[in-house]
Amino acid sequence: MTDMEPAPGETGPSRAHTAILLVSVLVVATCGLIYELLAGTLASYLLGDSVTQFSIVIGSYLFAMGVGSYLSRFVRDDELGAFIRVEVLIAALGGWSAAGLFLLFPLVDDFRLVLYALVLAIGILVGLEIPLLIRILRGRYAFRDLVSNVLTYDYVGALVASLLFPLVLVPRLGMIRTGMVFGLANVTVAIALTWVLKERRARAFDLAAGVAVLISLVFGLFIADSLQRWSEVAYYGEGVIYAHSTPYQRIVLTRRANDLRLYLNGNLQFSSRDEYRYHEALVWPVLGRVAHPRQVLILGGGDGLAAREVLSDPQVAHVTLVDLDPEMTRLFRDNAELAALNRGSLSSPKLTVINTDAFRWVRHARGPYDAVIADFPDPTAYALGKLYTLSFYHELARLLAPDGMMTVQSTSPLIAPRTYWTVATTLEAAGLKTRGYHVYVPSFGEWGYTLAAHVMPADAVRLPPTLRFLDATAERLMFQFPRDMARRPTPVNRLDNQALVRSFDEEWAHYEG
């Protein structure tokens, strides 16, 4: 008998059974990694600090798999029956994991306890799978081919999951449906094995359990959008009028009375009641200090509100807006109510929209630009933190005209002063002169920005009389910092240390308790 031949006495159907079991290895490996990726993504989305959350989730999950592998030794008979029941349990827990976490997040005080308990439970069950399958398959292959076949299918399943999850599943299905689809895959394996391989007299309970879980998951697929809306209404406490997951973020618009709000990945970006304060303070202290702002670069700002302010200056000849997510710029260009809010700025013939990663784009871009406005979300994760690094600011300094000026959204100098002043320290390390300023925006509280230039111009500023908030007196007061927001020593934010992300997480966590 060669290594790849069946064991003595193996029949034709047994070969088919072996093939079914090996396909099961591929399916369960793919499902197991999908549940791990879902937990890590949800933890990052709901709790912030993606590196910390992914690290804890992956570590806990792998530890739990080790526990599950150890516990498999106590299954002393009926390995197939045990494997089938494990699959049914994983299908129920993993399939409903994303929906359950979304629904529980606004309702429980200690969400981390729920999250990590679920990660450990699924990890233990996933850890039981491969040892049980190896024992079920023993005798069908020589030992060395048994192990190599099982591990090959296991690793191929991991590759399939890692490619499908970011490229296909989350963009097209969303996280709730993704969990349910792979729960269906798990329970289908259980039902198929129960029907094909298990003895008839022992099938009834396992089939009934499998079918019950399957029905619940199919039902969940149909109500996935409603589950997402219920969870978001509970989370935001406001009526959700638009919600969409793109490959880059979760976009949610809410309305309460006449207040329209935009959230990206759960973080408030603006309120229509007071966004004019934020955007006038973002744009005019830089635009009003540049003598002839002909060419303007906006980084971020896919809602078109900063572009609205820039395009209201008749001196501006052209605006380049670089925003990662085409769904954002499409939504705020084509939706009538949102386009009215930004005064149709994204349809202006003076404006060019480029949907790409700003970090990569600036490396190949050519200037000069008379004014640069960096309106990125707060550095809640390393993917955003790179847009506040020394490497990025070196490129912006290269694009900035010798007499040009830029401004950077820099989070709250009251809640996160170390984070706020780290932006200035990093801009200065890139060879630019800086001046900090702040404004009170009711939806956000005290909010900060940083001016930067090769040569800081005189303090005279040109402000149009049509602004709703900013005048010469208000603009002058923005540059005054009381003691609790005063400058303090901070490190340079580099790609290899991402000091800004860590300080942001620490300061905001302390503030929010």
Image (cartoon, helix red, strand yellow):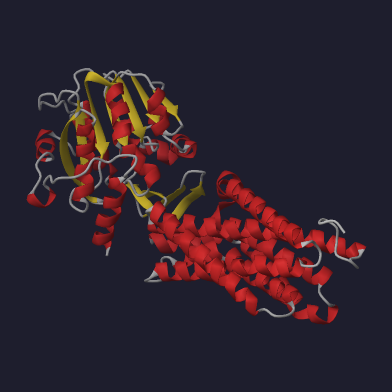
Q: Quadrant of the N terminus?
A: bottom right
The image shows residue 433 at horizontal and vertical percentages of 16, 29
The image shows residue 329 at horizontal and vertical percentages of 45, 35
Q: Quadrant of the C terminus?
A: bottom left
The image shows residue 101 at horizontal and vertical percentages of 49, 65
In the depicted structure, whether residue 62 falls above or below residue 470: below
Q: Residue at x 52, y 63 (%)?
A: 62
Q: Residue at x 32, y 45 (%)?
A: 498
Taking depth in this image into account, of 313 and 286 the one nearest to the observer is 286
Quarter of the rendering containing residue 283: top left
Image side of residue 346 versus residue 310, left or right: right
Q: Residue at x 74, y 80 (%)?
A: 205
In the depicted structure, whether residue 402 falls above or below residue 512: above
Count of residue discs: 0
Image side of residue 97 versus residue 402, left or right: right
Residue 223 visible in the shown view: yes
Judged from this view, the residue extending furthest toward the front is: 1
Q: Residue at x 49, y 39 (%)?
A: 327
The image shows residue 28 at horizontal and vertical percentages of 66, 61
Quarter of the rendering containing residue 144: bottom right
Residue 466 visible in the shown view: no
In the depicted structure, whether residue 337 falls above or below residue 457: below
Judged from this view, the residue extending furthest toward the bottom is: 201
In the depicted structure, whether residue 177 falls above or below residue 394: below
